[in-house]
Image (cartoon, rainbow, N blue to C red):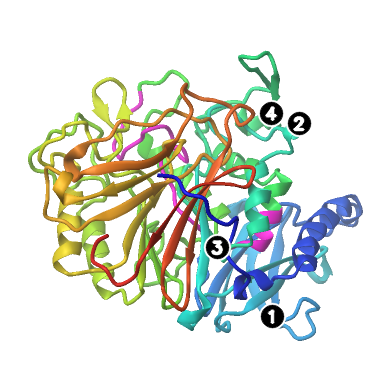
Amino acid sequence: MSSSVPEGPSPGRRSVLRGSLAASAALTLGGAAAAAPALALSGRPRAAWGVQTGDVTASSGLVWVRSDRPARMIVETSSSESFRRTHRHVGPLLGTGSDFTGTTALRGLPAGEQIHYRVTLADPDDPRRTGEPVVGTFRTAPARRRDGVRFLWSGDIAGQGWGINPDIGGFRAYEEMRRLNPDFFLCSGDTIYADGPLQPSVTLPDDRIWRNVTTPEKAKVAETLDEYRGNFRYNLLDHNVRAFNAQVPSIVQWDDHEVRNNWYPGQILDDARYTEKDVDVLAARASRAFAEYFPVATLHARGGGAEGRMHRVVRYGPLLDVFVLDMRSFRNANSPGRQADDTTGILGAEQLTWLKRELSRSRAVWKVLAADMPLGLVVPDGSANIEAIAQGDPGAPLGRELQIAELLRFIKHRRITGTLWLTADVHHTSAQHYAPERAAFQDFAPFWEFVSGPLAAGGFPANALDSTFGPERVFVRAPERANLSPMESPQYFGEVDIEGDSGELTVRLRAEGGTVLFSKVLRPGRVGQ
């Protein structure tokens, strides 16, 4: 049942960020854009797409920027907003090979501190010729448990024909999330809709007109590398997104729409919109563009065999490890999901082995399994096939459910505590509790799955549940018809607040407009609850 809760946590380390700091980040972005004509005339590089940080830990993080021309990326960090003392980090040379984007790794940062940074772009032929610096800020993960952690999650951005609408202020939920000032944002996939062209306007059922900002790359489905790049650039046209990125670091994963709806490796398309029918070719272009436009540690690693891998663990202090899953790159083909033997599943055998090993090693109080698809909600692919895990058969695990059963059994028998699943994808918000006494497969400990989203896309009715793992839908908020625009249905995001002293974790499901729809408190140190 839904319950009434305060709008946010009580003041603490996280909420000390001064209003002037947030304002300065937004003003600096606006100032850079306002000064752009003069900088362009003088031939100096511009960073008009803002800055963003990603995969922040207690001692490290990644800073991203995009230039409008070849430039050297230089990052200065400071413990003060005035940049009285700075550390200088010389980043990569930005050029056509990366669409003028670049990421610089910051290491040796102090734990649990507010870090201020500014990115300067320098002419590679004359380092004295620099563009106007763009500033941002982020908090490193705490070294002490008592400091607590608070983060947000959601997904599904610019989908179903609903893009940046200037009439309603663009992607408004981003500004609402920025004002909550979380430690970080977990973006649970469908970061773009490369398969979702935008029309200049759409007439709603009540005859109101939805207007989209449009670009050439959003006029058709993405196939070329440049078209995928243009889809990622599109979201950065929104001022709310740029201001949010300058203040809140992200942990980002992908799902299907970064490439094409419901894709899987080896798929050959039967879709007249595409001249390139080989999905593996499209996925390679999309993953390159994704790596160019998001600061993801394992996509920018050097050595160790990790480069190019989406799945990873982001360790956020003693209270939290975030296990970022990739349910797209290693899956088998979509099918009715009735196989009695399925070692590939939705994660692939190698990723499942990695996940079990890293869960066993984790000493964090809470272990968030960041999934880009839900477990017990039936997500169809056409009339016969299944896109996610649950296939609608309430009996013993079959198909991709076999791999999830193996994972849940492992968590129970290894007595791994503090696991919970967070996801988006289905364009509504809900809370599911999984319990063996309600399930056909019973060799697992109870756990919770929370769904949020969309963040800037169409709303859809709630999916049916599959009782193989015994889910009970404790809360749901969803529209009654498909593809309601953000003018007709609120956008959704979730909040996770871990209290330092007690270790209690509170999940809040939020609707755009400041409403807390549902909350649940979980207690630490339990195998299941």
* Above or below: residue 8 compared with residue 86: above
The answer to which image quadrant residue 52 occupies is bottom right
Are there few (<14), some (14-19), or many (20+) residues within 10 Å of tag 4?
Answer: many
Which numbered disc flags the more N-terminal residue, 1 or 2?
1
Does the CB distance between marks 3 and 1 fall below 8 Å? no
Q: How far apart are marks 1 and 4 (CA)?
A: 40 Å
**Which residue is drawn at the image coordinates 59% and 62% (left, top)?**
182
The three-letter amino acid code for the residue at tag 3 is Phe
Give the residue number, with chain letter if any, for mark 4.
212
Label 4 SS: loop
Give the residue number, with chain letter if any, for mark 2.
167
The three-letter amino acid code for the residue at tag 1 is Arg
**Image quadrant where one finds the N terminus:** top left
Any part of residue 91 in sight: yes
Give the residue number, with chain letter if any, for mark 1.
88
Label 1 SS: strand
Front position among marks 1 and 4: 4
